[in-house]
């Protein structure tokens, strides 16, 4: 049986999003445990709203998910980084419209105090607890399908983490 040209379904697009590597002054990175998945840790991230720049979206997502407004942006990934959802999640996440996300990641320095972090700042709570970790530990904390993305972030931002740690000594 032959297929007619043009009858193949188009692959789903990627959702455009942002993520934030939030460093403390010692060069450690903020991670939080997801409210909907015990034991699943990640950095703040989310979609870009219509009319927002990626940086504006990063600031908004950081505040909504952590209550953090005191941060200085230090840089961003050179490229957009994509990840694909596993087949069993396509159709369940984002109303089945996307195959994964294509994200721009930003590095920022937290300028506040730990006690000012408020995971309940937004009505839709994303995280239940948080901690600071060494950047090299990030890939082992994330769900498997996002591990290559986190490995790319570690490779790109480890020099920044080291500079921050050295400056803190």
Image (cartoon, rainbow, N blue to C red):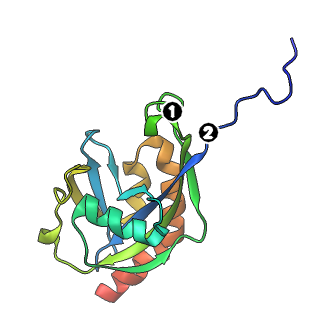
The reply to whether discs 1 and 2 touch (Cβ–Cβ < 8 Å) is: yes
Q: Residue at x 48, y 47 (%)?
A: 146
| Callout 2 crowding tier (Cα within 10 Å): few <14, some 14–19, many ≥20 | few
Q: Work out which quarter of the rendered image holds the N terminus and state it.
A: top right
Q: Residue at x 18, y 66 (%)?
A: 117
Which secondary structure, mark 2? loop
Q: Residue at x 25, y 74 (%)?
A: 69
Vertical placement of residue 115 versus 86, above or below: below
Tell me: 30 left or right of 159: left
Residue 12's disc is: 2
Q: CA gap, disc 1 to disc 2?
A: 9 Å
Q: Residue at x 26, y 50 (%)?
A: 126
Locate residue 7: give its quadrant: top right
Which of the pair 63/166 is nearer the observer?
63
Which secondary structure, mark 1? loop
Q: Position of residue 77 (x, y in %)?
A: 54, 70
Which of the pair 158/103 is nearer the observer?
103
Q: Which residue is mark 1?
A: 90
Which of the pair 51/70 is nearer the observer?
51
Residue 165 visible within the image: yes
Tell me: 45 left or right of 51: left
Numbered-mark total: 2
Vertical placement of residue 95 versus 146, above or below: above
Q: Position of residue 43 (x, y in %)?
A: 36, 58
């Amino acid at each position: 049986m032959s297929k007619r040209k043009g009858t193949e379904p188009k692959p789903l697009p990627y959702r455009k999003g942002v993520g934030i590597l939030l460093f403390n002054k010692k060069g450690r990175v903020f991670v939080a445990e997801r409210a909907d998945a015990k034991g699943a840790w990640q950095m703040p991230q989310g979609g870009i709203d219509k009319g927002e720049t990626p940086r504006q979206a990063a600031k908004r997502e950081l505040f909504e998910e952590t209550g953090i407004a005191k941060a200085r942006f230090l840089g961003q990934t050179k490229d957009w980084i994509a990840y694909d959802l596993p087949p069993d999640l396509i159709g369940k996440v984002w109303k089945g419209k996307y195959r994964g996300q294509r994200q721009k990641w930003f590095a920022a320095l937290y300028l506040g105090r730990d006690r000012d972090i408020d995971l309940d700042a937004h009505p839709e709570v994303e995280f239940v607890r948080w901690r600071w970790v060494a950047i090299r530990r990030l890939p082992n904390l994330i769900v498997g399908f996002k591990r290559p993305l986190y490995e790319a972030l570690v490779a790109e931002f480890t020099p920044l983490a080291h500079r921050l740690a050295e400056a803190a000594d």
